Amino acid sequence: MVDYWLKLKCCRSSRAEESRTNLAEDHLRKLIELTAYLRSPQGCPWDRAQDYDTLKALLLEEAYEVVDAANARDIGGLAEELGDLLFLVMFYSRLAEELGSFTIHDVANRVHDKLVRRHPHVFGETRARNPEEALQSWLSMKEKEHGANGKAAGESALDGILPSLPSTLVAQEMGTRAAQAGFDWAKVDDLLDKIDEEVEELRQELATHSALTSEDSRSKARVEDEVGDLLFAVANIARFLHSDAESCLRRANVKFQRRFRAMERSILERGKQMKDATLEELDAVWNEVKAAETHEN
């Protein structure tokens, strides 16, 4: 009897999965057809005017809007933003198809095949017992693929990091690759000590060049170097703690904006403008806003 119910459950699950797959295929097909129509002579003049370059800014904007929705846990907004991002994938693929380069089917097939190749611990004979082993399996297969594609031995582990990425992501990716090569802090306290060291070096540089002017370019460059070292270390503590610096900074930006707006409202309610309040008054109101948030949480 148990076997009967197990088989029935699996059968129903398989049918439900097949139904969802068919529905997804139908929606994707309609989106592919819509994208092609928008690019046709009967379609939209704006869509027809776009090319690889004009879509880049839109692609970045939509990607960041996905990140914002995910950070806010705005599930409805996330579904919408993912749709906008998917449309741009379709759009780029349509441009390529018109040029005879590739199609959306090639895009889907390539990523499918790559995911299968990069998961030998799922589709091969070996198995990963934890996320760390799974990641190592992925990286090992990725390295083999690079070798098969002609990557020369002895190239840097830092090769291939896109300079167009946000600097926080570049710093974190460099830290990740250095760690994979065996060059990393042993524990988080060591990294905190490194941050303290960078702060002290910045203090010393500022004390040495306290009369910094816009004409003093060499002194300014040294100060900027120290600030950069500090930011690099902070970005990597996020990595070390299994987070990412970009998301951490975005959350901090949102928090600062929320508190600053609340401070502005509070100052106005007291019959003042921000510019008329003293720094002591602003600090006091800021602390009140912060305390109120802490109490609510």
Image: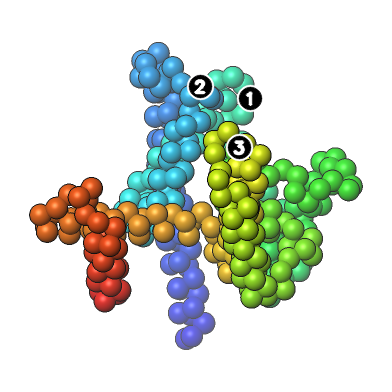
Q: Which of marks 2 and 3 is nearer the N terminus?
A: 2
Toward the right, the furthest residue is 153
Please name which of the two marks, 3 or 1, marks the residue nearer to the observer.
3
Residue topped by disc 2: 51
Residue 56 pos. (x, y %): 50, 31
Report whether residue 62 is seen. Answer: yes
What residue is drawn where x is 42% and y is 28%?
35
Q: Residue 283 carries which label?
A: none
The residue that appears at 63% across and 43% down in the rendered structure is 219
Residue extending furthest toward the top: 41
Q: Tell me where residue 118 sits by quadrant.
A: bottom right
Q: Foreground: 161 or 50?
A: 161
Dot in front, 2 or 3: 3
Which callout, 2 or 1, points to the residue nearer the camera?
2
* Residue 168 horizontal/vertical position (percent): 57, 51
Colour setup of the view? rainbow
Q: Residues within 10 Å of mark 3 (few under 14, many from 20)?
A: few
Q: How far apart are marks 3 and 1 (CA)?
A: 52 Å
Q: Which mark is residue 216?
A: 3
Q: In this view, does 65 lie to the left or right of 130?
A: left
Q: Can you give x and y, in whole percent of width and height, for residue 76 in the image?
A: 31, 53
Left/right placement of residue 159 relative to residue 106 reads: right
Task: Please tell me whether mark 1 sits on a helix, a strand or a loop.
Answer: loop
Label 3 element class: loop
In the image, residue 38 lies at what x, y percent? 39, 23
Q: Name the residue under label 1.
A: 101
Q: Nearer the viewer, residue 69 or 173?
A: 173
Between the C-alphas of marks 2 and 3, the distance is 44 Å
Please report whichever mark, 2 or 1, sits nearer to the chain's N-terminal start.
2
Amino acid residing under circle 1: Ser
Three-letter amino acid code at the position of disc 3: Asp
